[in-house]
Amino acid sequence: MSVSDYIPVIGLEIHSELLTKSKVFCTCSAEFGGERNTRCCPVCSGMPGTLPVINQTAVEYAVRAGYALGCSINKFSVFDRKNYFYPDLPKAYQISQMPLPLCINGVVPIDYEENGEKKHKEIRINRIHLEEDAGKLIHDDLNGVSLCDYNRCGVPLIEIVTEPDMSSPEEARTLVETISLLLQYTGVSDCKMEQGSIRADVNVSLMRKGDTEFGTRAEIKNVNSLKSIYRTIEFEIKRQAQILDRGGKVVQETRRFDANRGETKSMRTKEDAHDYKYFPDPDILQVNFYDEDLERIKNSLPEMPKDRLAKYISWDIPEKEAMVIVNTKKISDLFEEAVKCYNNPKSLVNFINGEIMRRMNLGEIDIEKPMFTAAQVAKLVEMSDTDKVTKNDAKEIFREMAEKGGEPEDIAKREGMLIVSDTGKVLEVIEKVLAANEKAVNQYKGGDVKVFGFLMGQCNKELRGAATPKVVKEAASKEEAEEIHAAFEESRTRCFTAHYRRGMPRYRELKKLLEAGTIGKIRGVQVIRTQRQTAEEMLPEDQKPWRVRPEISGGSHFYEGDAHMLDLIDYLAGPLTDFKLEVTNETGFYPGEDAVSLSGITENRVMVSGTWCYATYKAIDRFLIYGDKGSVWFSYYDNAAPLHFEALADKNAVAHEGVMGGVRKEAEMKTWDVTPEVQEYPGLGQAQDIVDELRGIPGAQCYSTLDSAMRSLRITCAAREQMKELREHRNS
């Protein structure tokens, strides 16, 4: 037979020390550490004639843990003496709870992955009881003696006893991890395994498939890490399977896990409950709860992990990234405070998961005692987002914040990293760099585009503290555009761009109707463009359509194609003077953006919002313009589709709803369609405009100019750069 022929049956007894200031039955400090035997008194060291007094906070913490783990709370509870002799227990008994614990019948749901499959399971909690911790044995191998440190004696401890509902090492590991997180969020324990504040006794038995009775269990004591819990169970399953395969019997015993050898070793025969001779402790009063007490404790529970996760996802943070934040309470608390200071959750998550977590994993940051505050992190991320410092410099600034502390703006000023976007200086430096690198400039003009990176690097080096690479690029593009303008003016030649929709009859007609006040004063523009992922876009890189290959198109759909839609917004509602973008790549089939959202305002104070996504279930094509007297909507891509109008029947009517004589009265509306001329070739109108203008026909003009093209290009380039930064972050 093999391991697969047996069903593992696993239960846990999880011990977690509580974060009270004093011990559970005396006033000694419960803080971890201290010189040996300096944090104990006659009570916790078990001197004759002493009387224990219960710590009320410890009781309430145990109840908080019970609520977090879905337990019912006993309104009547008592403490018992668990009798056994061991050197680290000076009284020869432990004050614990047996028949009437504080909490019973809980359920903890777990989500885990096993063999590449995502799974969900609910693990029952039999009980949670409050007890005192034992002391600590210190083994002196050199002198061959063992010594006792009683500092830990009497530290309040909850024992969480599960039902034997687990059947794999991963389930047990996940349960301990989940419970640890819940206890941290409730504030009852710090769950520092390395300090022994949470540890587990692991009970493992095997039963043959088809059997109805559990096998004989072995208990492995005081396993103190998630990795060790997994390895303990894994080894124990193999050990017991080998015994059963040989026809032997598994002995009920207590064992310990040797982390160095990766195996369990026998300690002693396992006791049953009756061996401990439990009886009520006569020195401790019973615990009685009133309904109002329990209600107060329950209402004091903070926001739990699942609630925070749901909240972060509602902020459009990907679930995987949100989980990273939630799974470390100190990080989650930092994030919560940072969002209050700078309301940009996505940027903060990117920085925290990318930079702070990285330095934590490297051991460079003690998140328990950080040198920085949430407000300082928020300020640094805001400075990076607003181009007051570069992304790379932000990392350097944070390194100093983490090591020495300090305000990010002060560090940036001191190190010459604070950016002042002086366009005049930028252009001056660009000219200087180009003059000093004539060879590289000639190479670029000859078609060697690779040298552009070198030239940019030289500019950025000269402009450190004056401009970001983005500002340099924009300035260089502006200068290049001005050179093109100058060249055309000098040659007295007109420059046109291929934004042909300005010349289409449907949009010429629409422009006239809008200017005539058909829908009143334009208040806003909303556009939505979605499309299914195409099969061609999933092909190998060299076989993909040219639009999603940046080396050909420059970016993706938005960069290449949707610039036309941006230009139409510019034509109908005025140039965007301010805008904000969010970009992402949802499918991962090509490097460019496949989803973009835009919000902005035009020079005419028209609000603009747009959504473009190329990874949806179907195509949606809607262009809406609304004013204070009506609206018009239409298909952007269907050039034969009509323009749908809705407006007040009486232009002089009041647009708002009003109440007259107790009766609500709405202004009367009318609807109609306009179907302009359809040309066989969509660009024919623009071509005709160009020809007419060049011929000198009076009033003829092509409205698709370099200026208008540059305004749209500014937006698509911003999306491209943002997508590039996103890829770099994901790769890092």
Image (tube, rainbow, N blue to C red):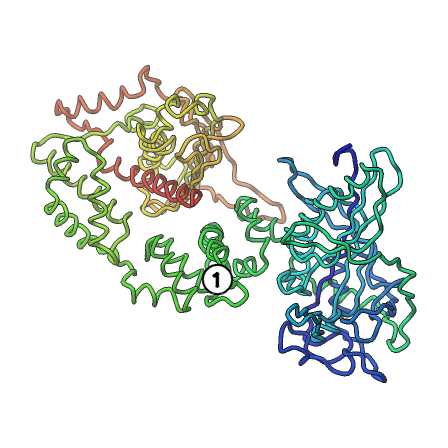
**Residue, far bottom:** 49
72 over 553 or under it: above or below: below
Residue 553 appears left or right of 635:
left
* Residue 288 placement (x, y as % from top left): 86, 70
265 over 687 or under it: above or below: below
Whether residue 607 appears in this view of the structure is: no
In front: 643, or 302? 302
For the point 75% across and 42% down, which residue is it? 167
Counting the numbered discs, the total is 1
123 over 21 or under it: above or below: above
Whether residue 225 appears in this view of the structure is: yes
Residue type, mark 1 in image: Ile
Q: Quadrant of residue 663 in the image?
A: top right
Crowd around label 1: few <14 · some 14–19 · many ≥20 (10 Å): some
Q: Quadrant of the N terminus?
A: top right
**Residue, far front:** 143
* Residue 40 placement (x, y as % from top left): 71, 80
Q: What residue would you read off at disc 1?
A: 365
333 over 11 or under it: above or below: below
**Residue, far top:** 680
* Residue 74 placement (x, y as % from top left): 85, 62
Q: Quadrant of residue 596 in the image?
A: top left
Residue 605 appears left or right of 467:
right
For the point 46% across and 61% down, which residue is it? 364
For the point 51% across and 64% down, which residue is it? 366
In front: 140, or 204? 140
SS at badge 1: loop
* Residue 713 placement (x, y as % from top left): 29, 37
